[in-house]
């Protein structure tokens, strides 16, 4: 009898559609993300770019083992959002801010994972990439995905004059002797 | 045993070393079977066209098998995990294709200082040079010839990759300081070859290359090897190399689809399972005749592991670098501090490599050193200042071969077929810590010289603040000149078993201060040429010869 099949299960790219936040949890998560990345200066708020929908794709539904990054179980994120609900849904944004600060200082690792997901989700959204293009001198050419276009066009070429000035040397095989007897490069006048 | 097959040569592992060996042997009609525990990869497996490409580098495209946990992977314990990929193409499936060569001095560090486990290579740069050239021609490299800091090399298949703003900025800085620098060689195409597209500078090479511009063995050596008739079996995990009468007789492998055991009988066995997988397999192949593992009568299998000494220095400037443009491998390097100068307080040296950035999330999440954008009201200002204005300088130092830096079996963890995982102990030697400290100061000096520096952040001497990245797995079954100081002779023939060869990262006796794959592939090509030229003689040997002559003139 052959032993059972071992299938190479890889984490599905882009996560899975298996999990959905309740409307209430989505609102809390939106508020959390908006606290991390406030809108302004031409950039949208995370809640405007479907951040909770993005994060949901990386939540492992109840009853399944959270095997891969971000290893976020549905029960775990649900409980977390419930614990932040009062503060984050309060009309006074200072309460939300303080609650997030308290979360960060009391459970740094759990906070870091959620922050990472917010940053990953936010900065990969087409509307945010558009804002980067429009608002940042260094980001005019930035694209949402590296392929298929790439960035070869306009990439600056080597400066031939600089190349011609490069100095350098190396030890030949027969020049290698014990260090005690080996002149340093500076002594040999070889250092650039 | 369900099935028994026979070959002239059995190659274990279809990665950088295995691909080269299988192809070169089969060029001469030698019947080769290759067993590979992983799969073929499809370009659409890559994340480059997906919005989530940055996040996915932490999942299917993580470099750490403990994170991916694929059926083809095996687990490791220890604070500094070895990083690798298990597939046709091996770890090159996630490599950057940085393609420097070792320098002549790198083959003679034993003569120079002999510290810790340092030995001379049993060959010289000149011995290996023809095989570097053969390998470069097989795979296609991008190169600017004329580096005065290294022996002359032939033209590449295409010109060096364009530097962009990052490369120009730092080349000017090195020029200002009067330090050596040169455009980096890359194992990637800057013009098309064999149906592979030229690189379009998209960026995330460390998640592989869907254009096949990067020279990974699945697109360089393997198509030719298959045309030559090599029988490559994927999802075939070797559990044991078999021996009889002092000779290797083949291997037993597990078909990962069915769990069935099969045997391949071969006249010669070449192990190419990498600097961790090769010692693992040799240790798993212990028997009454080889109680401490195969080829391990001197106890050296698994010892002297080298990863390179690494430190990552992130720098941000007051103007665009557009570091998201261009391949991920270093765009240029300085080898101003490559040679040993004991007045600095350490032996060996380092390359200063200038790397680019990545995407917007990478910028927000602190680039390479954890300098994460704050959340809250200051987020926007930080991000806007840092995104696209960044470059990375990394110090890549030669690390000493230390006997306690070592791969052993860990039977408390197993792969998907129940075979033992590995325990890897890797700690930086004091010499290498000092080297990194000195190197990091030079990195800061160079970044400052480029002007307009507004922020900087460091990983520290990797291994102190962060684990040392185990990207380069070297030295664990090294070549040497005597059966006492090494596992194989100078043609990769194990001292204990003359028809058992090892040709992969584990063969390298020292790490040099450059990426290893051009060198380990040159060693693998040389090993194949030796087997081709001496096939009959090898089969009649009962002891492994110490001195032989080069196979090609
Ligand atoms: C993130 C990253 C970036 C890198 N960048 C660079 C770079 O820019 N330049 C450079 O020079 N190097 C780079 N490297 C290193 C480079 O990938 C390796 O040096 C090279 O792939 C090692 O070749 P190898 O033949 O020793 O092993 P590998 O290429 O790892 O191949 C070993 C193969 O053996 C198979 N195998 C192992 N055990 C078994 C078994 N029991 N049965 C069957 N099959 C088995 C594995 O599945 C694997 O496919 C990088 C590595 C990483 C991880």
Image (cartoon, coloured by chain):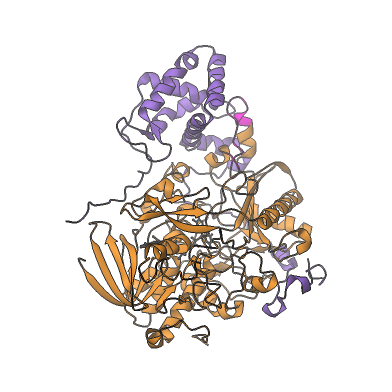
Chain colours: A purple, B orange
The verdict on residue B379 being magenta is: yes
User: Between residues A94 and B465, which one lies in front from this camera angle?
Assistant: B465
Whether residue B350 is situated above or below residue B24 in the rendered picture: above
Q: Which residue is rendered at x = 16% and y = 56% of the image?
A: A1
In the drawing, does residue B340 fall left or right of residue A115? right
Find residue A174 and report its horizontal and vertical position in percent: 69, 80
The verdict on residue A130 being magenta is: no
In the drawing, does residue B69 fall left or right of residue A46? left
Magenta segment main secondary structure: loop
User: Between residues B346 and B397, which one lies in front from this camera angle?
Assistant: B346
Q: Can residue B216 be seen in this view?
A: no
In the drawing, does residue B522 fall left or right of residue B195? right
Find residue A160 and report its horizontal and vertical position in percent: 69, 65
Find residue B525 and report its horizontal and vertical position in percent: 47, 76
**Quarter-of-image position of residue B127:** bottom right
User: Between residues B465 and A162, which one lies in front from this camera angle?
Assistant: B465
Q: Is residue A43 visible?
A: yes
- Residue segment shown in magenta: B366-381
- Furthest toward the top, the residue is A91
Find residue B500 and report its horizontal and vertical position in percent: 40, 75
- How many numbered marks, from 0 up? 0
Q: Which residue is rendered at x = 71% and y = 74% of the image?
A: A171
Quarter containing the N terminus of chain B = bottom left
Q: Which residue is rendered at x = 75% and y = 60% of the image?
A: B175
Whether residue B259 is situated above or below residue A64 in the rendered picture: below
């Amino acid at each position: 009898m052959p032993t059972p099949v071992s299938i190479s299960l890889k984490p599905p790219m882009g996560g899975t559609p298996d999990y959905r936040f309740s409307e209430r949890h989505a609102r809390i998560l939106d508020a959390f993300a908006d606290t991390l990345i406030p809108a302004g200066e031409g950039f949208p708020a995370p809640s405007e770019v479907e951040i909770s929908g993005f994060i949901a794709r990386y939540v492992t539904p109840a009853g399944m083992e959270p095997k891969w990054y971000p290893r976020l179980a549905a029960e775990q994120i649900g409980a977390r959002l419930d614990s932040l609900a009062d503060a984050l849904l309060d009309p006074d944004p200072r309460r939300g801010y303080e609650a997030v600060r308290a979360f960060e200082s009391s459970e740094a690792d759990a906070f870091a994972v959620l922050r990472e997901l917010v940053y990953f989700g936010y900065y990969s959204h087409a509307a945010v990439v558009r804002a980067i293009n429009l608002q940042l001198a260094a980001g005019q050419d930035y694209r949402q995905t590296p392929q298929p276009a790439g960035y070869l066009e306009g990439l600056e070429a080597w400066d031939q004059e600089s190349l011609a000035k490069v100095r350098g040397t190396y030890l030949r095989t027969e020049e290698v002797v014990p260090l005690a007897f080996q002149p340093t490069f500076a002594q040999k006048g070889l250092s650039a | 045993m369900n099935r028994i097959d026979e070959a002239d040569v059995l190659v274990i592992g279809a990665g950088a070393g295995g691909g080269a060996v299988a192809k070169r042997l089969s060029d001469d009609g030698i019947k080769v079977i290759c067993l590979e525990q992983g799969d073929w990869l499809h370009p659409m497996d890559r994340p480059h066209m997906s919005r989530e490409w940055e996040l996915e580098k932490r999942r299917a495209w993580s470099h750490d098998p403990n994170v991916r946990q694929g059926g083809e992977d095996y687990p490791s314990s220890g604070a500094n995990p070895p990083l690798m990929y298990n597939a046709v193409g091996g770890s090159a499936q996630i490599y950057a294709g940085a393609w420097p060569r070792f320098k002549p001095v790198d083959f003679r560090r034993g003569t120079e200082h002999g510290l810790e486990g340092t030995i001379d290579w049993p060959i010289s740069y000149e011995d290996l040079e023809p095989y570097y050239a053969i390998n470069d021609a097989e795979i296609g490299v991008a190169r600017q010839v004329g580096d005065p800091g290294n022996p002359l090399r032939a033209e590449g298949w295409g010109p060096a990759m364009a530097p962009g703003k990052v490369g120009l900025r730092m080349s000017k800085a090195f020029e200002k300081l009067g330090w050596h620098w040169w455009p980096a060689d890359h194992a990637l195409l800057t013009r098309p070859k064999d149906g592979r597209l030229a690189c379009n500078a998209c960026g995330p090479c460390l998640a592989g290359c869907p254009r096949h511009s990067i020279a990974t063995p699945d697109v360089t050596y393997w198509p030719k090897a298959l045309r030559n008739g090599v029988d490559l079996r994927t999802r075939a995990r070797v559990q044991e190399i078999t021996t009889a009468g002092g000779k290797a007789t083949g291997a037993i492998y597990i078909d990962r689809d069915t769990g069935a055991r099969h045997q391949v009988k071969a006249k010669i066995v070449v192990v190419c399972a990498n600097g961790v997988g090769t010692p693992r397999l040799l240790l798993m192949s212990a028997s009454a005749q080889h109680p401490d593992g195969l080829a391990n009568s001197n106890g050296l299998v698994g010892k002297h592991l080298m990863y390179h000494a690494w430190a990552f220095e992130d720098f941000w400037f007051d103007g665009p670098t557009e570091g998201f443009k261009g391949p991920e491998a270093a765009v240029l390097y300085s080898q101003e501090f490559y040679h040993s100068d004991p007045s600095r307080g350490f032996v060996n040296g380092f390359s200063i490599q200038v790397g680019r950035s990545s995407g917007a999330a990478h910028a927000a999440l602190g680039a390479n050193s954890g300098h994460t954008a704050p959340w809250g009201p200051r987020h926007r200002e930080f991000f806007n200042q840092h995104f696209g204005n960044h470059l990375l300088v990394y110090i890549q130092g030669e690390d000493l071969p230390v006997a306690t830096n070592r791969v052993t079996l860990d039977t408390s963890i197993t792969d998907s077929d129940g075979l033992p995982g590995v325990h890897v102990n890797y700690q930086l030697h004091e010499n290498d810590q000092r080297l990194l400290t000195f190197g990091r100061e030079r990195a800061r000096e160079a970044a400052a010289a480029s002007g307009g520096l507004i922020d900087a952040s460091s990983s520290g001497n990797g291994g102190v603040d962060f684990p040392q990245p185990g990207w380069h797995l070297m030295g664990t079954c090294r070549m040497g000149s005597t059966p006492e100081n090494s596992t194989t002779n100078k043609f990769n023939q194990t001292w204990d078993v003359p028809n058992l060869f090892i040709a992969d990262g584990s063969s390298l006796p020292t790490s040099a201060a450059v990426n290893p794959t051009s060198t380990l592939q040159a060693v693998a090509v040389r090993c194949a040429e030796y087997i081709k030229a001496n096939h009959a003689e090898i089969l009649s040997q009962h002891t492994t010869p110490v001195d032989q002559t080069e196979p090609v003139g």
